[in-house]
Image: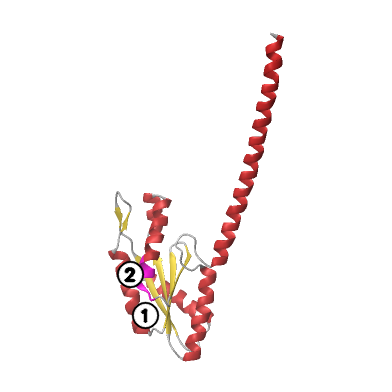
């Protein structure tokens, strides 16, 4: 009986040591994963892309807006800032879950990207708010584009597999005129967005 205990004691010690090695390796792997996630977050932030929609993020949008405003003044060419707010995003999240809400944002982002020229900029400003920068575009053409965007969002429901969700968007336009500053354009865009939502 004593001999069996003598044999099982080294085995138990080896098992404990192996378990401790696995625990240590697991801790190292968790630390490496946390570090990789942090680096990925930093890389996404530096890329200027919204990780959900792959559109420009707010910081990149601001830089592009400065470029378009400067270009409009320098070349005396009008441009437009179109604001797109996805209506009832909260209802989609509550009725179908957060995954469906994210799918709705990706869906609208894809529609917007397909509706603009490759030289234009589409950005997600957070939540269900998007912005489009369209250079070389006069006020009438910008309004036509805004109406086309609203029709397109309404006419292309989100397919969730088991059901389709109709989306709508509130769209407003702010012209970018020669001599405008970035702050003037942003104020005009905010005023126009509120006016549209009042109706």
Q: Which residue is mark 1?
A: 142
Tell me where residue 164 sits by quadrant. Answer: bottom left
Please state which of residues 56 and 145 is positioned toward the viewer in this rendering: 56
Q: Secondary structure at mark 2?
A: helix
Tell me where residue 197 sits by quadrant. Answer: bottom left
Which residue sits furthest top? Answer: 1
Closer to the chain start, of discs 1 and 2, is 1
Q: Which residue is painted at 45% across and 76% down in the image?
A: 189
**Picture coordinates of residue 34 (x, y %)?**
61, 50
Q: Which residue is painted at 62% across and 40% down in the image?
A: 26
Q: Is residue 161 visible?
A: yes
Note whether 3 is above or below 195 in the view shown: above
Asked if residue 113 lies in the magenta stretch, the reply is: yes
Residue count near mark 1 (Cα–Cα under 10 Å), binned few <14, some 14–19, many ≥20: many
Q: Which residue is mark 2?
A: 150
> Magenta part of the protein: which range?
111-117
Total tally of numbered discs in the picture: 2
Note whether 183 is above or below 18 in the view shown: below
């Amino acid at each position: 009986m004593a001999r069996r205990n003598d044999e099982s004691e080294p085995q138990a010690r080896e098992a404990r040591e192996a378990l401790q090695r696995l625990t240590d390796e697991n801790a190292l792997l968790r630390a490496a994963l946390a570090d990789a996630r942090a680096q990925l977050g930093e890389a996404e932030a530096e890329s200027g892309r919204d990780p959900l929609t792959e559109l420009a993020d707010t910081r990149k949008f601001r830089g592009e807006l400065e470029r378009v405003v400067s270009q409009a003044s320098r070349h005396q060419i009008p441009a437009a800032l179109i604001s797109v707010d996805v209506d009832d995003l909260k209802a989609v999240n509550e009725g179908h879950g957060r995954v469906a809400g994210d799918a709705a944002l990706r869906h609208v982002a894809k529609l917007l990207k397909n509706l603009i020229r490759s030289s234009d900029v589409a950005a997600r400003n957070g939540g269900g708010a998007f912005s489009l920068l369209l250079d070389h575009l006069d006020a009438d053409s910008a309004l036509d584009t805004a109406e086309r965007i609203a029709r397109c969002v309404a006419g292309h429901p989100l397919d969730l597999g088991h059901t389709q969700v109709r989306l709508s968007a509130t769209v407003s336009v702010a012209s970018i005129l020669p001599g405008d500053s970035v702050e003037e354009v942003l104020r005009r865009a905010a005023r126009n967005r509120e006016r549209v939502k009042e109706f």
